[in-house]
């Protein structure tokens, strides 16, 4: 298995809703990442988990809450989002945070906040 | 500090003609460099990577890139464009901690 699987592919939520994005990989990678990508822009790093511990939080608002229950799974919990949070959310993984192997990206979740 | 400059925001080529997407980098370290492609509403797919081995790197779908340290460049080329190559392309440099620094992207249009 050489894929990063993200669910759901599309999500529409109201500003008062609570939802979660899910990311899964079975490549034995020990670093996992959340990125946010707006249209026509490069991805922006949100969070990095290394060996299931949060190692980087790029000053993301608390309405985004990451969770890494095990080495294969990464969640992003969403609460009280704003319309400007609408974007493509990408998950990625790599063998290790300290090695330059490159990342494997998932196909993303297209989030619309109404 | 690491950074990447993609010199063209848009490139348009005719089908069957060569593709050149330009990337210059700045790095305090011996860099690792990558090219990723993103088709509309899709994730990013790795095309190729340079990690201090051969300076001419061959990737998937006929793409290749040459690392030129003296010019701090890592340009992406393909001899003959296909319609399926139309997409957004990102040049990326990583630091020793494997943190990625993305270029602003180049949108490739292929004209039939």
Image (tube, coloured by chain):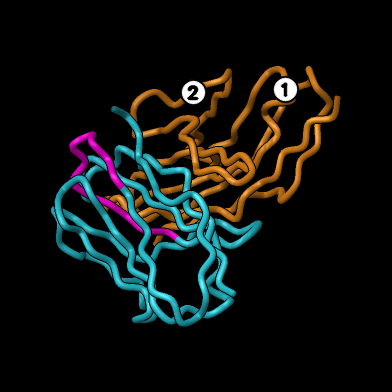
Chain colours: A cyan, B orange
Q: Would residue B8 be counted in the magenta stretch?
A: no
Q: Are marks 1 and 2 in contact (CB under 8 Å)?
A: no
Q: With respect to residue B85, does A36 lie above or below?
A: below
Quarter holding the C terminus of chain B? top right
Q: Secondary structure at mark 2?
A: loop
Q: What subunit carries mark 2? A: B
Chain for mark 1? B
Is residue A92 or residue B50 the one in the foreground?
A: A92
Q: Is residue A61 above or below residue B31?
A: below
**Horizontal and vertical percent for residue A21?**
37, 59
Return the disc, 1 or 2, that comes first in the chain's sequence: 2
Residue in the image at 72% along x and 39% along y: B108
**Residue at x 64%, y 59% (from the top left corner):** A39
Q: Secondary structure at mark 1?
A: loop
B104 left or right, relative to B35: right
Q: Position of residue A67 (x, y in %)?
A: 23, 64
Check disc 1 and report the residue beneath it. Answer: B81
Q: Residue at x 32, y 29 (%)?
A: A2
Across and down, in percent, residue B45 comes to 48, 36
In terms of depth relative to the viewer, which is nearer, B93 or A76? A76
Q: Is residue B57 above or below residue B43?
A: above
Q: Is disc 1 in the same subunit as disc 2?
A: yes
Quarter holding the N terminus of chain B?
Answer: bottom left
* Mark 1 crowdedness (10 Å alpha carbons): few <14, some 14-19, many ≥20: many
Q: Residue at x 32, y 50 (%)?
A: A23
**Which numbered dot is residue B23?**
none
Corner quadrant of residue A58:
bottom left
Range of magenta residues: A24-35
- Residue B59 tag number: 2
Residue B72 in sight here:
no
Q: Is residue B30 visible?
A: yes
């Amino acid at each position: 298995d050489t894929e990063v699987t993200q669910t759901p592919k599309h999500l529409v939520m109201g500003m008062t809703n609570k939802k979660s994005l899910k990311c899964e990989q079975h490549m034995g990678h020990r670093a996992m990442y959340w990125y946010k990508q707006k249209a026509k822009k490069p991805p922006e790093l949100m969070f990095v988990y290394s060996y299931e511990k949060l190692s980087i939080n790029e000053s993301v608002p608390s309405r985004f809450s990451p969770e890494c229950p095990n080495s294969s799974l990464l969640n992003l919990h969403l609460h009280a989002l704003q319309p400007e949070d609408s974007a493509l959310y990408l998950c990625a993984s790599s063998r290790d945070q300290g090695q330059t192997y490159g990342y494997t990206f998932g196909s993303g979740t297209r989030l619309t906040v109404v | 500090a690491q950074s990447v400059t993609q010199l063209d925001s848009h490139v348009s080529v005719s089908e069957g003609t060569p593709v050149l997407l330009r990337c210059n980098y700045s790095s305090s370290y011996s860099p690792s460099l990558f090219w990723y492609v993103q088709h509309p509403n899709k994730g990013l797919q790795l095309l190729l990577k340079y990690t201090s081995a051969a300076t001419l790197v061959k990737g998937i779908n006929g793409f290749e890139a040459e690392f030129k340290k003296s010019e701090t460049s890592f340009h992406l080329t393909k001899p003959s464009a296909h319609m399926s190559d139309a997409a957004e392309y990102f040049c990326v440099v990583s630091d020793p901690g494997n943190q990625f620094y993305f270029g602003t992207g180049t949108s490739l249009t292929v004209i039939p």
